[in-house]
Image (cartoon, rainbow, N blue to C red):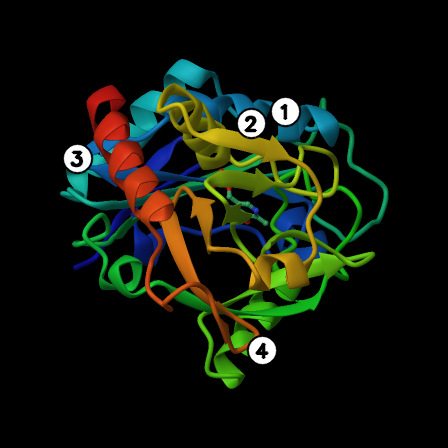
Amino acid sequence: MTRTVYVNGEYLPETEAKVSIFDRGFLMADAVYEVTSVLDGKLIDFEGHAVRLKRSLDELGMQEACSKEELLDIHRKLVEVNGIVEGLVYLQVTRGSDGDRDFVFPDPEITKPTIVLFTQNKPGLADSPAAKKGNKIISIDDIRWGRRDIKTVQLLYPSMGKMMAKAAGADDAWLIEDGYVTEGTSNNAYLVKGGKIVTRPLSTDILHGITRKAVLRMAEEAQMEIEERLFTIDEAKEADEAFTTSASAFVMPVVEIDGVALGDGTPGPIAKRLREIYLDESRKAAI
Ligand code: PMP
């Protein structure tokens, strides 16, 4: 089926949607993005994604392509016209195109941002077989730039990390910097030891996950103990369980790290419970 996508104010069949070859998103990765999940045809935590998008744009001195209300309308319209019940809405804003290639940012009065949105249909997203099995991960060096709190489209190294995981027979990779786990290639990372959830505190070293924020709030409400501190991959290997969070995979249990099985090698009770709570609560609050 041909999707209807959104480009700079227009709804178009995907085959007719075009962006300039001079677009800075294409030439310089001068662009930010968001991915919002859809369950029961509704948006999960749209507000959180809209707020983070604004922050990413502000940090890079980029203009807003449209208001939050317009963004919500576009998200809803794309979900509706594409018949998405479970899936994702991808949004990207670039610094636009001034019709040539130059390192210097174009004048924002003249060059307007490019905005693109499209849907991805993912039936069975919530009831995923991967979540029942849990993920096997490997650890790799974190060689990304230093502003990982800005959600830019510089995703080459995360893609390479996923390919390294695949080549090693694993599902994903966790990134290590100065001996400590930063986060996953496309998710935030957690271990659980003695009932306590441990995750890295927010800083410029990691993306401030929208799912992370929601899951930590829900864990606290469920009287679970949380410790925000650095942890090593060796500590994670000795944990009772581990998991990741992201808007596209919710709470995903981790069952193996660098070939070492965690606990009995199946998804742990805290990860499973948090996944249930997250999906329940998010569905109730979806818009
Ligand atoms: N860290 C990284 C590097 C990511 O790419 C993502 C997902 N885009 C996350 C964490 C999780 O963030 P969120 O919960 O907002 O999807």
> Badge 3: few (under 14), some or many (20 or more) residues near its Cα, within 10 Å?
some
The reply to whether callout 1 and callout 3 are in contact (CB within 8 Å) is: no
Give the spatial CA distance, label 4 vs label 2: 29 Å
Task: Decide if ligand 1 comes within 8 Å of the CB at mark 2.
Answer: yes
Residue 33 can be seen in this image: no
Q: Secondary structure at mark 2?
A: helix
Give the structural element (helix, strand or loop) at label 3: loop
User: What amino acid is labelled 3 in the image?
Assistant: Gly
Asked if the beta carbon under badge 3 is closer than 8 A to the nearest atom of ligand 1, the reply is: no
**Quadrant in the rendering for residue 232:** bottom right
Seen in the image, is 43 located left or right of residue 6?
left
Q: Is residue 172 above or below residue 38?
A: below
Residue closest to the far right: 104
Q: Residue at x 46, y 40 (%)?
A: 195
Q: Tell us which disc is closer to us: 3 or 4.
A: 4
Amino acid beneath label 2? Arg
* Residue wearing tag 2: 52
Of residue 270 and residue 209, the one placed in the foreground of this image is: 270
Q: Which residue is mark 1?
A: 55
255 is higher (above) or lower (below) than 170: above
Where residue 256 sits: x, y (%)? 47, 69
Q: Quadrant of residue 133?
A: bottom left
**Disc 2 versus disc 3: distance between alpha carbons?**
22 Å
Q: Secondary structure at mark 4?
A: helix
Mark pair 1, 4: CA separation: 31 Å
Is the C-beta separation of discs 4 and 2 under 8 Å?
Answer: no
Residue beneath disc 3 = 41
Q: Which residue is mark 4?
A: 164
User: Which residue is painted at 42% across and 63% down in the image?
Assistant: 263
